Amino acid sequence: MDELKTNVLYYGDNLEILRKYIPDNSIDLIYLDPPFSSKKDYNIIFKESTGEQSAAQIKAFSDTWHWDKSAEDTYQDIILNAPPKVAKLIDAIVGGLGRNDVTAYLVMMTICLVELHRVLKNTGSLYLHCDPTASHYLKMVLDQVFGARNFRNEIVWAYTRPGTKHQKQFPRTHDTILWYSKSGESWMFNPDGVRIPYAQSTLDRGKYSVATSKVTKGISKRVLPSGGKCPEDWWQIPMIQGNAKERLGYETQKPVALLERIIVASSNEGDAVLDPFCGCGTALVAAQKLNRKWIGIDVTHLAIAVMKSRLEESFHGIQVDVIGEPEDVMGAKALARQDRYQFQWWALSRIKAKPFPEERRKGADKGIDGVIDFVERDDATSKQAMKRAVVSVKSGHVHVKDIRELKDIASRHAMGVFITLQPPTKEMCTEAVSAGSYHSPLWDRDYTKIQIMTIEELLQGKAIDMPPATSPYAKAPKVSKKEGEQIALEGSK
Ligand SMILES: C[S@@+](CC[C@H](N)C(=O)[O-])C[C@H]1O[C@@H](n2cnc3c(N)ncnc32)[C@H](O)[C@@H]1O
């Protein structure tokens, strides 16, 4: 295995990526926020051309687990190859609870945690973010993988939500974060980096002095550290609000402040932070901000595209490498065979197109896979107007009728783009040319109305000849790098 590469995003299943690319004892801190067993699809919301986030949601991933062949194979793998005490526990859990959705989820998490334990340095820590649906099972698994004596904290991240009128139980308003260190002797903990202000009531009690030891009227005061107190194991950090600048529309996005606290507490500048379920990349943004190195893994091209764009917008001049995406036509073919949607999302992200939601692909818009919006000038009013290029992506055989269909859809829009893995036929090229051109009043020039681009050309870096497009993702705020500074967010006691 090569040396550890950092500041890199990996596309793929984390187990495969960990086994292929991440050496033993190489990571200082792991944060993971796997999809819970909550039987929900998480959605990613793209920005509308009006700048608002809309109902244009695309399923980013599904966290519904089923006991299928892959769960059975993973279970057998654990029984045969995992450390014996881990295998015994999983055997007992599956024996007791049966082969069902929850045990499918646990089996997948167990094999991943065994691998994460391998890549962690002896001084390293792992923070597993989960919720009460599965935290009790996951803690048992972690006790076996890491050793119960290496359990450091169960952190409760508490937030508030308005209740509903007919509440039948207390609202569930906390997540659980389980912290384990790899060794019981030495691990990183930096309380000075995460101190929060003392409550005024503590200071008013008169029993304490801050930082300097004093004797007042014969009463010796307990000395409290300067800079505030170390937070307890329950943290009140607000969830990302609907109008928050950092909100990208990724349903499971976590606040940067939460990740900053974890990273400052359990790593030093220059350390390597790994997030194997990195979603829209909150842990990576926090790591970059705090001068740590980072590695992100995600199994959807949508997440990789959102994350890349978020990191590039947040940090001026940052270099974000992506590994695991197709680099040649063979790789693109392999991706198309493996998963047609991932292929489509990858191709669309390469041309900065926004995927077009499945539920809208009906009637006249049936053949649209993606759209690219751009700013234009309305000829009649001379005002600014948004225009659209519609995109069709094909991984299989292509035919002149595909171009006719695109021509028809594009007749209601400014332009049409046809992305194809197979080379187009002469007939297709002729049909595309027959659509003529689109005249841009703003740029005062003509663009070919229907453009065909092969995946090979796309990989060679050929761009679509069209007016400058707007970004398909919600804009991430600029982030300035700082040194281990933690924002105090909670009213402490
Ligand atoms: C709950 S989200 C993480 C959200 C993240 N903490 C954030 O703030 O944006 C979980 C992510 O794990 C990814 N995922 C699920 N299974 C995976 C796997 N086997 N390998 C890699 N990523 C996976 C999903 O695509 C999803 O983006």
Image: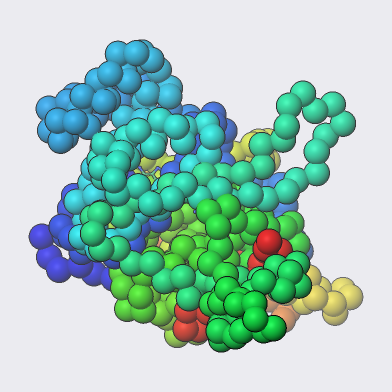
Front residue of 106/136: it is 136
Q: Reply above or below: 389 against 95.
A: below
Q: Reply above or below: 422 against 220.
A: above
Coordinates of residue 81 in the picture (x, y in percent):
12, 33
- The residue located at (80%, 44%) in the rendering is 162
Front residue of 63/209: it is 209
Q: Is residue 227 left or right of residue 398?
A: right
Q: Reply above or below: 3 against 148.
A: below
- The residue located at (56%, 63%) in the rendering is 231
Residue 378, quarter of picture: bottom right
The N terminus, quarter of image: bottom left
The C terminus, quarter of image: bottom right
Please identify the residue farthest to the front as the structure is shown: 218
Total number of numbered discs in the rendering: 0
Is residue 381 in sight in this rendering?
yes
Coordinates of residue 404 in the picture (x, y in percent):
55, 46
Q: Is residue 91 left or right of residue 57?
A: left
Coordinates of residue 245 in the picture (x, y in percent):
69, 68
Front residue of 81/59: it is 81
Is residue 374 in sight in this rendering?
no
- The residue located at (39%, 37%) in the rendering is 139
Residue 49, quarter of picture: bottom right
Coordinates of residue 57 in the picture (x, y in percent):
63, 46
Q: Is residue 77 left or right of residue 317?
A: left
- The residue located at (72%, 35%) in the rendering is 171
Q: Is residue 16 left or right of residue 101?
A: left
> According to the image, what is the colour scheme of the structure?
rainbow
Front residue of 12/71: it is 71
